[in-house]
């Protein structure tokens, strides 16, 4: 079987460089990584994770806790898991997927935890964990996290609706006290600093079928309205309900969603939505956790950019540069 020395000779680099490429690829230039990966492929070299675990006194296992109903949120969290897996694979880490905190007892050993869908009731248990934790989702519990910049994204989406000429802007939020929902509401509210229109917030369960009950109480909806929604699920429900009431979308009423994972593409017309880079944020969650495991410094909070993707549920704007808006 080929050895580390064989790879080093093939790539014309030192054994230390090969080791860095395998264990800490972020510390090595792209060109060196390319040379070493090519040599490993040519020789069919497979790093020995057991040996690595013994050397570094680690399990090389990360526990991924998804504290949500996977059937309800698929494929959102599937994309997150895909990103986590891709980054962990680069470092010869495996992961164990858990869907309930009670399953923590089944893990004999792991080096750290990535937690998604964390609620307030989960925090005491999570904060007792002895190994590093990174949360997917903004929180104020002192747990390092990765999330979209929900505040800025919602703020810019609201401003975009106003720029299109919609006069009555309403935020359709989720009945939740979680950080992401609060940030999206705050972004919507702060977009009204110009005082051109009066903000209004409605809330619903995060279910397309239940949004109609909320909107039914608001009938008739004023013409030239736009709903800025906290999720694509809510936006899809609003679209179906309003069309059923005879409103023309986007001429009479505009709709902007939030997520951009799947539901925006099955809507007709296709949703204008804030697209989150869920898979990329999964990679970042894993990278930040590995930094903590290896005692490298990392910031407590990380906000990732979101992009406003223009679909058919908002009016067209004639300026070419406004076909897609990047939210920084």
Image (cartoon, helix red, strand yellow):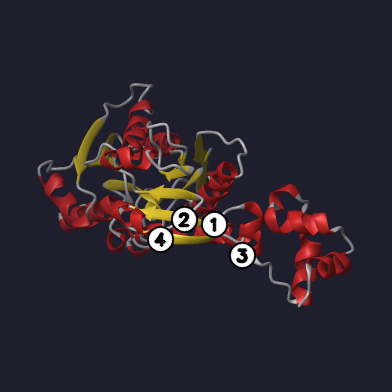
Give percent across and percent down for residue 259.
39, 51
Give percent across and percent down for residue 319.
52, 44
Q: CA distance from mark 1 to mark 2?
A: 6 Å
State which tag comes first along the sequence, 1 or 2. 1
For disc 3, the marked residue is 50
Q: Find residue 255 and name its label.
A: none
For disc 2, the marked residue is 109
**Nearer the observer, 123 or 242:** 123
Residue 302 horizontal side relative to residue 264, left or right: right
Q: Find residue 59 and name its label.
A: 1
Asked if 271 appears above or below 8 in the picture, the reply is: above
Q: Secondary structure at mark 2?
A: loop
Is disc 3 surrounded by few (<14), some (14 to 19) or many (20+) residues within 10 Å?
few
**Are dots 1 and 2 in contact, CB under 8 Å?**
yes
State which tag comes first along the sequence, 4 or 3. 3
Q: Can you tell which of label 4 and label 3 is closer to the viewer?
A: 3
For disc 4, the marked residue is 97
Is disc 4 surrounded by few (<14), some (14 to 19) or many (20+) residues within 10 Å?
few
**Are dots 4 and 3 in contact, CB under 8 Å?**
no
Q: CA distance from mark 4 to mark 1?
A: 15 Å
**Nearer the observer, 303 or 173:** 303
Residue 322 horizontal side relative to residue 128, left or right: right
Q: CA distance from mark 4 to mark 3?
A: 20 Å
Residue lying at 73% horizontally and 76% vertically, measured from the top left? 44
Residue lying at 27% horizontally and 55% vertically, measured from the top left? 236
Give percent across and percent down for residue 149.
46, 38
Q: Secondary structure at mark 1?
A: loop
């Amino acid at each position: 079987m080929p050895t580390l020395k064989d790879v080093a000779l093939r790539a014309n680099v030192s054994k230390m460089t090969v080791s860095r490429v395998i264990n800490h690829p972020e510390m090595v230039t792209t060109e060196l990584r390319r040379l070493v990966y090519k040599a490993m492929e040519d020789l069919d070299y497979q790093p020995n994770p057991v040996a690595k675990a013994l050397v570094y006194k680690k399990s090389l296992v990360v526990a991924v806790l998804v504290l949500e109903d996977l059937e309800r949120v698929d494929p959102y969290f599937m994309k997150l898991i895909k990103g986590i897996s891709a980054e962990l694979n680069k470092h010869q880490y495996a992961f164990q997927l858990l869907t309930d905190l009670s399953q923590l007892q089944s893990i004999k050993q792991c080096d750290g935890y990535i937690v998604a869908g964390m609620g307030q009731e989960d925090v005491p248990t999570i904060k007792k964990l002895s190994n590093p934790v990174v949360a997917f989702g903004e929180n104020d519990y002192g747990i390092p996290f990765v999330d979209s910049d929900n505040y800025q994204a919602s703020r810019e989406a609201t401003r975009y609706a106003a720029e299109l000429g919609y006069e009555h802007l309403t935020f359709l939020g989720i009945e939740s006290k979680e950080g992401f929902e609060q940030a999206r509401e705050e972004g919507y509210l702060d977009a009204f600093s110009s005082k051109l229109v009066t903000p209004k917030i409605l809330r619903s369960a995060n279910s397309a079928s239940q949004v109609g009950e909320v909107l039914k109480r608001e009938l008739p909806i004023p013409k030239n309205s736009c709903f800025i929604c906290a999720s694509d699920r809510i936006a899809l429900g609003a679209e179906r309900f309003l069309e059923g009431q005879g409103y023309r979308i986007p001429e009479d009423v505009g709709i902007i969603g939030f997520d951009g994972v799947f539901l925006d593409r099955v809507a007709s017309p296709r949703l204008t939505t804030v697209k989150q880079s869920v898979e990329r944020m999964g990679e970042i969650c894993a990278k930040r956790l590995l930094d903590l495991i290896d005692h490298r410094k990392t910031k407590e909070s990380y906000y990732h950019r979101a992009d406003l993707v223009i679909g058919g549920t908002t009016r067209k704007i004639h300026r070419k540069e406004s076909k897609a808006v990047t939210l920084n």
